[in-house]
Amino acid sequence: MSAPARDQLEGLGLSSSCADVIHHLWDYLDDELTPDGAERLRTHIAGCPECQSYEVYQSCFLEAVKKLRSRLGASGPLRERLADSLKEQGCGCWNKVRTDA
């Protein structure tokens, strides 16, 4: 991590480990990290109140989306557009959006 980015995080009271949580939390929640990566995030989250709050928020958000998705469904073309958009943004879950029913 570059010095300006590190300084900005520290100015917010966050560490580089917090940045890892922010960057990889959805992969963590989707069980898409390596065991070592998941353990590093789990360990950091357990000791960081800010990251614990972030994990709770994101977990609730994903659960709400899951409930809406099962209730409302999504057309094939919509799923394709969403998957393509996620892939362009570098989200590792893009193919899951395309294939999950």
Image (tube, rainbow, N blue to C red):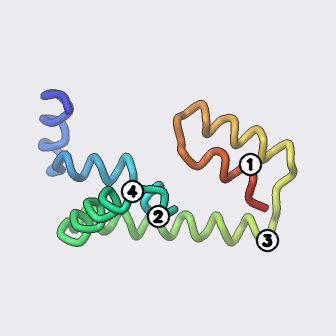
Which residue bears the numbered disc 2? Answer: 29
Circle 2 or circle 4, nearest the eye: 4
Identity, as a three-letter code, of the amino acid under mark 3? Arg
Q: Tell which circle, 1 or 2, labels the residue nearer the N-terminal end.
A: 2
Circle 3 or circle 1, nearest the eye: 1
User: Which percent across, then down, holds residue 93?
Assistant: 58, 49
Which residue bears the numbered disc 4? Answer: 34
Total tally of numbered discs in the picture: 4
Q: Are marks 1 and 2 in contact (CB under 8 Å)?
A: no
Q: CA distance from mark 4 to mark 3?
A: 32 Å
Disc 1 crowd, CA 10 A, few/some/many (<14, 14-19, 20+): some
Residue at horizontal 71 percent and vertical 42 percent from the top: 82
Q: Secondary structure at mark 3?
A: helix
Which residue bears the numbered disc 1? Answer: 98
Quadrant showing the N terminus: top left
Q: CA distance from mark 3 to mark 2?
A: 21 Å
Q: Tell which circle, 3 or 1, labels the residue nearer the N-terminal end.
A: 3
Identity, as a three-letter code, of the amino acid under mark 2? Leu
Disc 4 crowd, CA 10 A, few/some/many (<14, 14-19, 20+): few
Residue at horizontal 19 percent and vertical 42 percent from the top: 9
Q: CA distance from mark 2 to mark 4?
A: 12 Å
Which residue bears the numbered disc 3? Answer: 71
Q: CA distance from mark 3 to mark 1?
A: 17 Å
Residue at horizontal 72 percent and vertical 67 percent from the top: 68
Q: Is residue 93 above or below residue 87?
A: below
